[in-house]
Amino acid sequence: MNIKTKFASLLLIALQLNTFNAVAETAEEKGLAIAIEADRRDTGFIDSTAKMTMELHNKQGDTSTRHIRIKTLEVEGDGDKSMSIFEQPADVKGTAFLTFSHAIKSDEQWMFLPSIKRVKRINSKNKSGPFMGSEFAFEDIASEEVEKYTYKYLRDENLNGIDCFVIERIPTYKHSGYTRQIGWINKAEYRPEKIIFYDRKNSLLKTLTFSGYKKYLDQFWRADQLSMENHQTEKSTLLKWSDYKFRTGLKDKDFSRNSLKRAK
Amino acid sequence: MKQFYCFSFLLLSLLSATAHAVKLSGNISIQSRLFQHDALETNQHNHYNSFALEPEIYHAWDNRKQAVNFAAFYRYDQYDDERTHADIRELSWLKVFDNWELTVGVSKVFWGVTESQHLVDIINQTDQVENTDGEDKLGQPMIRFSTERDWGVLDLFVLPGFRERTFAGIEGRPRIIIDTDAATYESDDGDHHIDYAIRWLSYFDEIELGLSYFSGTSREPVLIPSIPGSFAPHYVIINQIGLDVQAIIEDWTWKLETISRKSDIENYIAATAGFEYTLYGIFETDADLGIVVEYLFDDRDELASSPFQNDITTALRWALNDTQSTEVLLGIITDLDESVVASFIEASRRIGSSFKLTLEARAFNNTVSNRPLHAFRQDDFLQVGFGWYF
């Protein structure tokens, strides 16, 4: 074996080792890495405002609608701050929620009741309940933080022509309504295309489908429509987003008790 | 006071001038009250119908840094001339500056954390004729200065002009006969006395803390017997310190409100303390069941003007979390010296997208003859309401 061939074989071993290393990345590590990358790509939007319409459909085909205005402020190193203001149904017009979300510790949440002008700090530890009678639970619409789940990469899969990573995630926070979720993450854009939810008994509960993705500020993907289908009740909720605005100049003080009282 | 009404008129003109850009909302409702037992007196009735209007106009400009809000209230009652009443709930101008905000006009504020009674909440007068639960308030003329900093929210109030408490009339039910025209005041300024209040509110992690001080005319009148069977309200000057605390500890929410009130006629301490605990998704449904237990204390004991001097309120709040936002609240108030003194049910459900059906029942049980609720002993009622919201 001359020097040349020796070198070539060493190179080959190194290459093999390298491949071996790649294989050695566990499914958990790969799942986490995908979640971190998705989070990184959605960092830096600073603030946003948007309008949300929720259409609630039941088995009988009845529809009821809610209109909500939402403001979000990105907080570096912590969960986002957000304010949701109800415009419809008319009997809850002016009701507003202020949420400081956190990755590990529980979110802080205040509610404003316009008829009696009361600001109420609410115990928001349990987020498994439905949001305004819809198929979305509070935890489904809460701010996405990497630390809220443990991850496991399952496989690559083509979903309706989109190359996706398929990841399983298990909530780390208390009182979740789910044992696990399976998410299809767009490989090119690291944005979710579909999520399947399994209930506390590990039975298939809901499917969430994202559609009408638009890119804002040349970086941030936001879906225009989120459709949540409950397989157990056959009810569904369609969430439509519109009027997205970014970097509108919102400040910390726009997410305070006083600003909650005059949010209407 | 006069300047205040001039100012109010100015705000109204401003609102109408910008009518094209205002937001109109509100509700119109009908209500029926049915009493189970015959009334104590022949001039009272067993069935009352009424309707109410509650329009609200709101206009904001200057990038929402300025706003005017006008909320009016009117109720027509079939029999009770006092319950047929109108009020300006709100007619105010708000201006937001960099580090503080100013509200001038008639407005409404809420202080406190407890559910069964609101001891600390003192700025607005109770619209007692609307309901006996003390949740309805009259608009209060005010100048409010508020600043929100790292150390919390500081509110300063100047309250020119006093609003007298409303009471049911001679044909009303439930009622104690109170001659509101015979109201007297400790202050020579009468209802023109200028009151002051200050409140600091902060939170530390999961603990909310409020401290307040009020100096002025008591919202709660002393009832002085006048002609036999009737009372005249007398409003004294008080100084009141209030403290309210709420702590979220795991699934429990602990609450405390306490006041120390001083006047020329009496000094006393009263408190409400308790907890709220919620069972989520009960019986494998989306419904939540909240349990509220509060202890009500007043150190004047049997002399207390409030019926709750050593009582426990136990309530269950059942929220179905359904599309129609169905909610049921039922509770009992137990006097630890006597027995159950009152019980109630409050329920509501949205019908379609803009109607709401409400149901309320109140019962006053075993009321001992020298206690304030004694006058209501025949007045158990069921109330049905239907409202259109826009």
Image (cartoon, coloured by chain):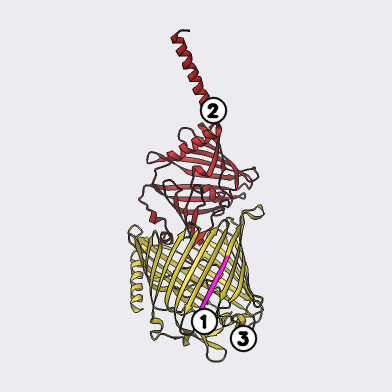
Chain colours: A red, B yellow
Range shown magenta = B264-274
Per the rendering, the mark at residue B81 is 1
How busy is the neighbourhood of tag 3: few (under 14 within 10 Å), some, or many (20 plus)? few
Q: Are marks 3 and 2 on the same chain?
A: no
Kindly identify which residue carries mark 2. A24
Q: Indicate whether B116 appears above or below B83.
A: above
Q: Position of residue A143 (x, y in %)?
A: 48, 47
Image quadrant of residue A150? top right
Please count the marks in the image: 3
| Mark 2 residue type | Ala
Q: Which residue is mark 3?
A: B41
Q: Which of these two is toward me, A226 or B298?
A: B298
Name the kind of residue labelled 3 in the image. Glu
Q: Is residue B293 above or below residue A222?
A: below
**Subunit of label 1:** B
Rendered location of residue B185, percent (x, y): 44, 85
